[in-house]
Amino acid sequence: MSLLFQGIPELTAIVTLAFVIARIPLKWSIALCMGTVLAVFVYVVRLFTVPFGVHTILSIVLLFAFIMWYSNGDISLALIASFASFLVAIICEMVCLSILMYVIGVTPNTLSFHPVLKIVIAEPHVILLFVLAYLFKKFLTKRGLYSCSI
C-alpha cells in the first residue's frame, strides 16, 4: 500500500522536479513511468538488508541515468538535477513531517504502527514538490531559460 500511495507519487514528483531543474521537456507519461520504476526499485532495495540511505544513493544514480538517457544532455546539469531534486524532497519531507506530527500530536513511533496515518501525513510534501516544480518552471520561463511546456 505504501508503494502505491506514497512511493510512486513521491518519486514522480522528484522526477518532475529533476526534469524542470535540468530544463528537459516534461511529458507526464514519461515522468510517471520513471517515478514508478524508481519506486519499485526502492521497494526492492529495501527488501534486502542494506544500510540506511543506500536506497537513496542508488535512486540518485538511477535518476541521473534516466535523465542522461532521456535528454542526451549535459552531464553536470543531470547530476545537479538528480542531487537537487532529492535534496529538496528530503528537506520538504522533514519540514512537513515535523510540522504535521507536532500539530496532530503523533510520534515517529506511532507512525510506524499506523501505515495509513503515515501515508496521509507524508502526502503534503509530495504536493509541495509538485508546486515547487511548477513555480521553478515559471521562474525559469520568465527568465527565458525554460521554453518547454509542462
Image (cartoon, rainbow, N blue to C red):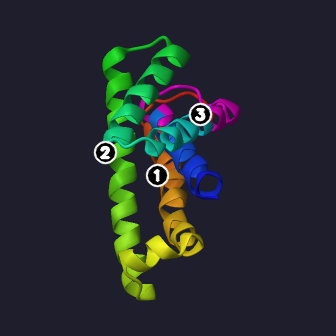
Magenta stretch: includes residue 22: yes
Q: Is residue 128 above or below residue 110?
A: above
Part of the protein shown in magenta: 19-33
Are there few (<14), some (14-19), or many (20+) residues within 10 Å of tag 3? some
Disc 2 designates what residue? 53
Instruction: Say above or below: 36 vs 126.
Output: above
The answer to whether any part of residue 35 appears in the image is yes
Q: Residue at x 49, y 30 (%)?
A: 146
User: In this rendering, which labeled residue sits more in front, label 2 or label 1?
Assistant: 2
Which quadrant does the C terminus fall into? top right
The amino acid on which the numbered mark 3 sits, given as a three-letter code, is: Val
Residue at 55% in and 69% down: 115
The residue nearer to you, when weighing 38 against 10, is: 38
Say which of 101 and 71 sits in front: 101
At mark 1, the secondary structure is helix
Q: Is residue 42 left or right of residue 82?
A: right
According to the picture, the residue beneath numbered tag 3 turns out to be 37
Q: Which residue is mark 1?
A: 132
Residues under labels 3 and 2: Cα distance?
A: 18 Å
Real-space Cα distance between discs 2 and 1?
24 Å
Amino acid type at circle 2 is Gly
